[in-house]
Amino acid sequence: MTIAAILFDLDGTLANTDPIHFQTWQDLLKDYGMDIDKAFYQSRISGGLNGEIVQDILPQLSPEAGKRVAEEKEARFRQLGTQLERLGGLDDVLTWTEEGGVKRALVTNAPPENVEFMLEVLQLGDRFDVKVLAENAPIGKPDPTPYNLALEQLGISPAGAIAFEDSPAGIRAAVGAGIYTIGVATTHDPHKLLDLGAGMAIADFTDADLWQRLLRRSHLPSV
């Protein structure tokens, strides 16, 4: 079956945001007597929803205080993220889809302010046919609902789609929706992404095996 759409996660997929997110969480949590390492970040924070993250690691906070913590964290992220760059090879993938009439969707757990900020910094605001944010879905990743909504809005079946995801939550969501999923190993070990159900894992969009698979699954011209 030809590829009808490619669905992209945002953080860690369109740009390598993980170092900034880790730094901001690390700095913020020091105010609460917590000194987190990368393993803690990857297992308890990466890819999750802010409300659930704060409730999990700072259960002593009231909902109102937890919301303020999450807002402060994202404000710090936006202060540090002004120099973000698109992940290698992303421009080629986007051009390839546009030339071949392949639809594009953004499916993310990121807060709306971060989505707007990142798309502006990366100059990608007008490159997606559909955007599904966690706040627009009844439940976020790792539940497949956000991906199911994207497929519905695009008017395609899972068999006609490919998803790119960097986090365990994202992999579970996309695979759970029946979509062939490619892990982007900016944040997590590629073997972990494969164990979670990714069909393959790549460092970025320049991967030669990625392009071979894309071309095998479509009739689009190569870049």
Image (cartoon, helix red, strand yellow):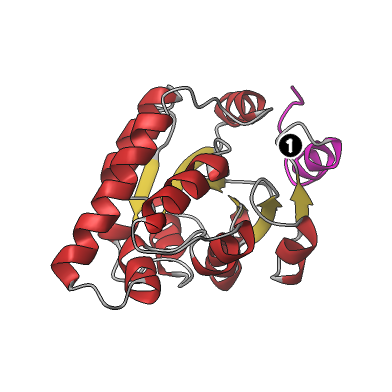
- Residue that carries the numbered disc 1 in the rendered image: 219
Q: Give coordinates of residue 221: x percent, y percent.
A: 74, 26
Foreground of the two, 157 or 192: 192
In this view of the protein, can residue 208 be seen by the observer?
Answer: yes
Task: From the top left corner, tell me how far across and down residue 129 is, in percent.
Answer: 40, 38
Residue 215 image position (x, y, % from top left): 78, 38
Q: Visible in this render: residue 9? A: no
User: Which residue appears farthest toward the left when viewing the image?
Assistant: 64
Numbered label tally: 1
User: For residue 201: magenta?
Assistant: no
Q: Is residue 211 inside the magenta stretch?
A: yes
Q: Amino acid at mark 1?
A: His
Q: Residue at x 68, y 54 (%)?
A: 183
Q: Would residue 57 be found to the left or right of residue 220 on screen? A: left
Picture quarter with the C terminus:
top right
Towards the viewer: 40 or 129: 40
User: In which quarter of the view is residue 14 placed?
Assistant: top right
Instruction: Say which quarter of the image contains residue 48.
Output: bottom left
Q: Secondary structure at mark 1?
A: loop
Along the line of sight, the residue nearer the viewer: 99 or 142: 142
Residue 148 vs 200, above or below: the answer is below
x, y percent for residue 105:
46, 44
- Crowding at label 1, few (<14), some or many (≥20) Cα neighbours within 10 Å? few
Residue at the location (66% across, 58% down)? 181
Residue 147 lies, with reference to residue 88, above or below; the image says below
Residue drawn at x 59%, y 61% as measured from the top left: 42
Position above or below: 105 against 79: below
Magenta region, residue range: 208-223
Identify the residue at the far front of this view: 33
- Could you tell whether 102 is left or right of 143 in the image? right
Residue found 68% across the figure and 28% down from its top: 88
